[in-house]
Image (cartoon, rainbow, N blue to C red):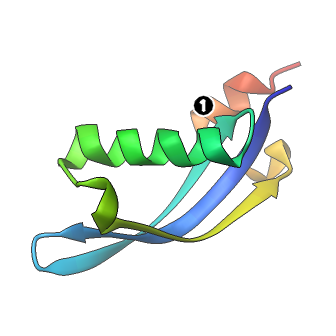
Amino acid sequence: MVKAFRAVGTFRSGVKNQPFTIDVVADDEDGAMEYIYSNFGSRHGVKRRFVVVSSMNEINPSESTDPRVISAFRE
């Protein structure tokens, strides 16, 4: 069963660290982390070692405004 996760952290953008908050749909925390790494790698060209996730929490899907989360839990 899929769950919704909210990740908060930073990633290296040039010489500065850019904060981020992202909502993810995944089976478990490991799947959510893999999605975050691949997302920042493909969109921003950031290596995995420069993506720092400070917190990863399971959330209620109704709390999210992310279209992927809304679509995954549509009834």
Q: Quadrant of residue 24?
A: top right
Say whether residue 37 is visible: yes
* 71 to 5, vertically: above or below: above
Q: Quadrant of the C terminus?
A: top right
Q: Which residue is depicted at the point 31% across and 63% down?
A: 49
Residue 29 point in image, percent of width and height: 69, 48
Say whether residue 65 is visible: no
Q: Is residue 26 left or right of residue 36?
A: right
**Amino acid type at mark 1:** Arg
Residue 69 point in image, percent of width and height: 68, 35
Q: Quadrant of the N terminus?
A: top right
Q: Is residue 66 left or right of residue 19?
A: right
The residue tagged 1 is 68
Relative depth, front residue between 73 and 39: 39
Residue at the extreme top of the image, as rendered: 75
Q: Which residue is depicted at the point 32% across and 55% down?
A: 48
* 74 to 23, vertically: above or below: above
Relative depth, front residue between 2 and 69: 2
Residue at the extreme bottom of the image, as rendered: 16
Q: Is residue 53 left or right of residue 14?
A: right
Q: Which residue is depicted at the point 37% across and 41% down?
A: 39
